[in-house]
Amino acid sequence: MDLGLSDKSAFVLGGSSGLGLAIAKCLAEEKVKVTIGGRKTARLDQALADICQINDRANALAVDLQDEAAVDAAERELRKFRPDILVCNSGGPPAGSATASDTRDIPTRTSRGDVRGW
């Protein structure tokens, strides 16, 4: 499918695994220049290698939304290339049963990334 995105760039937060990685791969298939962001560098490296097999116009950016200095550094990097597409895929309850999760701390864990307004 050609969505006409080949001249676009994207930043996919949480792009090193799960839904974020799936979105990043789909964007890569559309020839979008993809930058993935995540906390774990080993996962980022593996995800970047996987994405580069689809489209070599990809980068990774280590960022932990709980670390203000890391968020500031990521923001500076993102402002350099000004992504056309921003996928805010971060936070949420831990894996497991929805009925067993304590969701009261989700706003605390995710608000930094959700309100930053990259």
Image (tube, rainbow, N blue to C red):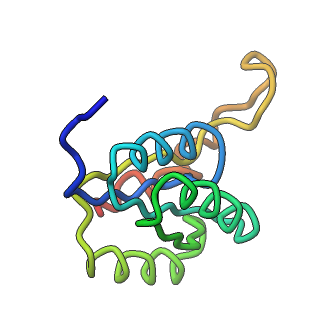
**Percent x, y for residue 33?**
35, 61
Q: Pinpoint residue 82: horizontal percent, then vertical percent.
A: 23, 70
| Residue farthest to the top, as pictured | 99
What x and y, as percent, mark residue 78?
Answer: 33, 74
**Res 92 → quadrant:** top right
Q: Nearer the viewer, residue 22 or 80?
A: 22
Residue at x-position 45% and y-position 57%: 55
Q: Tell me the residue at 81%/26% (across/down).
A: 96
Residue at image x 64%, y 63%? 49
Q: Is residue 62 left or right of residue 76?
A: right
Residue nearer the viewer, 15 or 70:
15
User: Which residue is more in the foreground, 101 or 6?
Assistant: 6
Give me the residue at 54% from left, 44% from top.
20
Q: Nearer the viewer, residue 82 or 98?
A: 82
Reply above or below: 36 against 2: below
Task: Check the picture and name the quadrant holding the N terminus.
Answer: top left
